Image: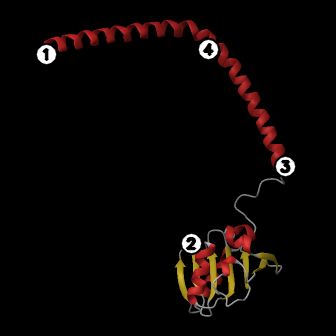
Amino acid sequence: MQPVLHAAEHAGAAAGKAVGTAAGLAGKAGSAAAPLVKKGLKLGWRALFAVFGILVVFIGAMVKSCGGLPSAGHVSVTEALPSLLRSAASCEPYSAQGVDKCVITSGSALLAGGITAGQDLTFYMQQHDPHDQLTATIGRWRTAGGTILSDTAVFLEIGPTQTVWYADTRSGFHLETGTFASLSAAETFLMRTGLAT
């Protein structure tokens, strides 16, 4: 057992010497290379700023050619829709108050299973700027006697005639659908479109 301990002590001492020697060499190499590194960094920062400037100009040209950036905090009414609903619906402006009328044809996969009794589904959507107008709309929905599914930042209700009422109080977006075949059909639509999460 002692020969093993003795060998381990020698290996530890040799490793310590190797580490000390390596540290000493690294220190000498580092001090000798310091002027070269400083000169390289000086050139490197200039090159970095030049590349950064070129990228800014390139990105600016790309954004301008694509029509600019979307405005922060405001999206169009159609952009506020979940992607599945947006791709299935055909929308057009309906009123001067910013209401859009959209139609999903009865053959759409979103309406599969007869959830609208074979009829197209029409819905109306609006992006409210005045927050109090949306609050009044939600208040009207609450008193209508439907089935409220969510009453948080997102208000979601299936009305008494199996219509869907959806409002996002954070963005001011709301929509109202036409009639579904049943309460469960309206719930199916909400799940398929991603309006109910």
Which image quadrant: the C terminus? Answer: bottom right
Compare marks 3 and 1 and give the one earlier in the sequence.
1
Residues under labels 3 and 4: Cα distance?
40 Å
Residues under labels 3 and 2: Cα distance?
35 Å
Which image quadrant: the N terminus? Answer: top left
Q: Nearer the viewer, mark 4 or mark 1?
A: 1
The answer to whether 128 is drawn above or below residue 119 in the figure is above
Front in this rendered view, residue 174 or 120: 120
- Residue on which disc 1 sits: 1
Marks 2 and 4 close (CB-CB < 8 Å): no
Left or right placement of residue 105 versus residue 136 in this view: right
Left or right placement of residue 135 versus residue 121 in this view: left
Q: Does dot 4 land on a helix, a strand or a loop?
A: helix
Residue 163 in which image quadrant: bottom right
Marks 3 and 4 close (CB-CB < 8 Å): no
Q: Nearer the viewer, mark 3 or mark 2?
A: 3
Residues under labels 4 and 1: Cα distance?
51 Å
- Residue on which disc 2 sits: 153
Residue 12, given in percent of the width and then of the height, sits at 28, 13
Compare marks 3 and 2 and give the one earlier in the sequence.
3
* Type of amino acid at the residue the image marks with label 3: Lys
Q: Residues within 10 Å of mark 1 (few under 14, many from 20)?
A: few
Q: Nearer the viewer, mark 1 or mark 2?
A: 1
Q: Nearer the viewer, mark 2 or mark 4?
A: 4
Marks 4 and 1 close (CB-CB < 8 Å): no
Any mark on residue 64, and which?
3
Q: Residues within 10 Å of mark 3 (few under 14, many from 20)?
A: few
Q: Residues within 10 Å of mark 4 (few under 14, many from 20)?
A: few
* Type of amino acid at the residue the image marks with label 1: Met
